[in-house]
Image: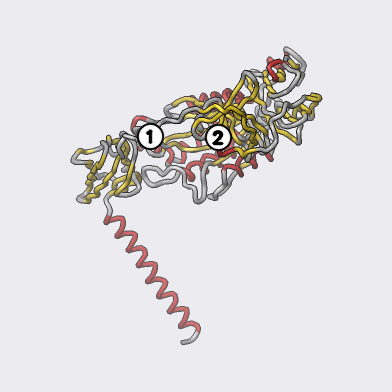
Amino acid sequence: MDFLSHINYYNHNMKKIIFTILCLIIFSHSAFAFDVVYPKSAFSKINSPSTFFVGAVKNGSKLYLNNEEIPVHKTGAFAQSVKLNEGRNEFVLVSDNQTKTYVIERPSSYKNYKPAVYTKYNNPLTVEISRNGAPIRTTAIQEGINRISHFQKGMPLKVLGELGNMYKIELSPKTSAWVAKSDVKQKKESYERAFLFDYRSRETDSDFIYEFALSQKTPYSITENGETMTLKIFNVGANEDNTAVFKITLNQRLMGYNLQYKGDTLVLSIKKEPKIKRAKKYPLKNVKIVIDAGHGGKELGAVGCCRNYEKDFNLSISKYLEENLKKMGATVYMTRKSDKFVSLNDRVKFTNDKDAQIFVSIHANSLPDSQNPQKHSGSSAYYYYDEARPLTEAILNAVSKSVNINIEGIRQASFAVVRNTSAVSVLIETAYVINPDDNYLLMTDDFRQKYAKAVAQGIKDYVWQNRHKHLTVWNRHKIKFEKIS
């Protein structure tokens, strides 16, 4: 067979393969009248009093669940909440003479276990933090916003007792906290009092810096209230309650900060407000912003009614947001610009390495089994540190003014990307992918463009709000730093 014959033979076979694939696609679409996105399988175990069915039918088709017709969106999308009894639950879905049966088993609510009991140690134990970023909590519960600080590896702690998988630790004679047993390891040396040798303040073009020279690493906490921060360094001798307390008053809004040990010196760096001029053309010049398109690559995020992926909606809105912010003169960095996986730690590191003042993470929402997707719709936004609440409010206010969508409100939550970044950080849930109406909006390019434009406007509003008061009370960037006990 000559060369041309080989080519013709190859082309002929490729046409046959392509034709076969097309036939299979057409056949599969004609064979299935509806697609169920959730539950993911025909047999599942769900420990909840309720769950929901999410998916889509062919346009114009009706859908029945256990002989009752359920609402279908004009896109074919549906979301239906169902109650679960303990034991076996059977659900039959029918559309266009196609039937699918789902069996969901809800485990018995009876649990034969005894609650953990607190055990106080006769002789306190000395441990040290075994990983960076380990949370110290106000209660013995390993979730939520009950965090005091996040300590670096090697921080010594005095353990007073235990409750379940948590240790109770002493920060000062009058202050205790909790740490997970899995975040510490036993330390042979005894727990010793630290000494504060010196403390000083200085500033650079971009930061206020406070340094506290100690004899060893020792626990600390920091709280913020508007333009005031209070730093407590525990287990420090020659101070009331063995606690050194410092108050820092800034003539500016907090724009992100970082607190960590460098050797045995505790260093607090507070970002200065960016130097900007009120101008129509470039109102965000000199402002560094990181946009984080949630999920990506192998991490799909939530799956929508029409089997569309959250990661794609996030990236689309993020790109439009980048475009709007750049037009305003901002310096913009993207944690991802394409459909690729980026870990949470890498997103945080990227943001901190860029020394950004603002971090915005874009997401689309979903729900746990116990919630009804038909009763939840619209936008919400989350922050962790109080400094980020004004940004959160400004963004949702801008969205409410220019985007036709329900506003669920703002909430405080302990998401890794808003908790560990040194910028003013907010996570936005644009809409619910498992609500048919919201899913339709997310599928619409016009909505995604308008939403991104509104977020950009909210960021601009935040940067410019109440700036005049900082220019009239003191000289710009003047600070007050004092030890109050």
Determine crowd level at label 2: few under 14, some 14-19, many 20+ residues with C-alpha closer than 10 A.
many
Residue 336, x across and y down, in percent: 58, 46
Q: Is residue 449 visible?
A: yes
Which residue is more in the foreground, 319 or 177?
A: 177
Residue 180 disc label:
2
Mark sitting earlier along the chain (1/2): 1
Which residue is more in the foreground, 342 or 57?
A: 342
Residue 49, x across and y down, in percent: 31, 33
Mark 2: amino acid? Ala
Which residue is more in the foreground, 254 or 187?
A: 187
Farthest residue, direction top: 473
Q: Secondary structure at mark 1?
A: loop
Q: Looking at the image, which residue is at 55% across and 35% down?
A: 180
Snapshot quadrant of residue 266: top right
Q: Looking at the image, which residue is at 20% across and 50% down?
A: 97
Q: Looking at the image, which residue is at 60% across and 42% down?
A: 347
Residue 165 falls left or right of residue 473: left
The answer to whether mark 1 and mark 2 are in CB contact below 8 A is: no
Q: Is residue 62 visible?
A: no
Residue 285, x across and y down, in percent: 69, 32
What residue is pinned by disc 1?
Answer: 113
Determine crowd level at label 1: few under 14, some 14-19, many 20+ residues with C-alpha closer than 10 A.
few
Residue 402 disc label:
none
Residue 374 falls left or right of residue 202: left
Question: Which quadrant is home to the C terminus?
Answer: top right
Snapshot quadrant of residue 303: top left
